[in-house]
Image: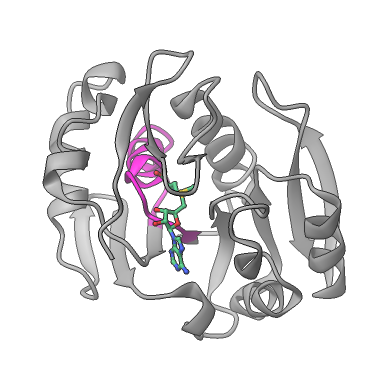
Amino acid sequence: MALNIEIKRTLDGSDTLFVPAIKEHYHSIFGAVQESRHVFIEQGLLAVSEDIDPVSVFEVGFGTGLNALLTDLTAKSHRREVRYTTIELYPLDRTVWGTLNYPAYLPETDAAERFNKIHEAPWEVPQQMNQGFHLTKIQADLRQYTPPDSAFDVVFFDAFAPGVQPDLWTKEIFERMYRMLHPGGLLVTYSCQGEVKRNLRYAGFSIEKLPGPPGKREILRAGKN
Ligand SMILES: C[S@@+](CC[C@H](N)C(=O)[O-])C[C@H]1O[C@@H](n2cnc3c(N)ncnc32)[C@H](O)[C@@H]1O
């Protein structure tokens, strides 16, 4: 299904996408890069112990590729080795991702090269992107996807909001996320809704509320005990 999509500028100056059919943005309108950095990089990737090498990340919703790009850049700057697997049901066309301003917005001079490489990488085939960053993009529906058990250190749960896609925030999906994590593994998400917390707890996670990025009071980090 090809989605009708509009590009919007968020308050930190970075772009996001808006899907009129579901009235939903891909990121916080207060700042796309700010949100991705805070929720997924700082509270997710960098919360994984430095003793874990490589770090295995699973992302729900590849979307614009922003989380993947920031992870690639962080792997380089922090000298971490990252294996990044991401699932997406509706990959974006080049006419959309090619116009996003992330490469120009980010200070790293190689951001454009890395961003293009991430998007141009074939689906379903594990790829060594850059030193320290391995990428596997899976085109599939999360609801039908059975991930391998105990294979990941951190899940970036970046689906559309629970009010828009309640069937992606269920106990059953979180049980699968729980099984796919190593003991001590983490799941981070921007949503702090009551139903999300209940379903995460039901799946076995312990929940930690953390301060959110500007415009969002709290976010969630869930741990596999
Ligand atoms: C909030 S956006 C993701 C933002 C993304 N992480 C980024 O940095 O741009 C949610 C993403 O989930 C994808 N998605 C929606 N339903 C899905 C499903 N059933 N399975 C996998 N991905 C899905 C959407 O197409 C969209 O790209």
* Residue 171, x across and y down, in percent: 75, 75
Say above or below: 199 vs 217.
below
Magenta residues span 59-82
Q: Would residue 96 be found to the left or right of residue 25 on screen?
A: left
Q: Position of residue 10 (x, y in %)?
A: 44, 19
Q: How is the image coloured?
A: one colour
| Residue 190 in magenta stretch | no
**Residue 176 in which image quadrant:** bottom right
Ligand 1 quadrant in view: bottom left
Res. 162 image quadrant = bottom right
Q: Is residue 141 above or below residue 34?
A: below
Residue at 78% in and 27% down? 217
Quadrant into which the N terminus falls: bottom left
Out of 215 and 207, give the one closest to the viewer: 215
Q: Is residue 209 visible?
A: yes
Please state, as top left, top right, bottom left or bottom right, where the C terminus lies in the image.
bottom right
Residue found farthest to the front: 21
Residue 138 versus residue 3 in the image, above or below: below
- Residues 205 and 165: in front is 165
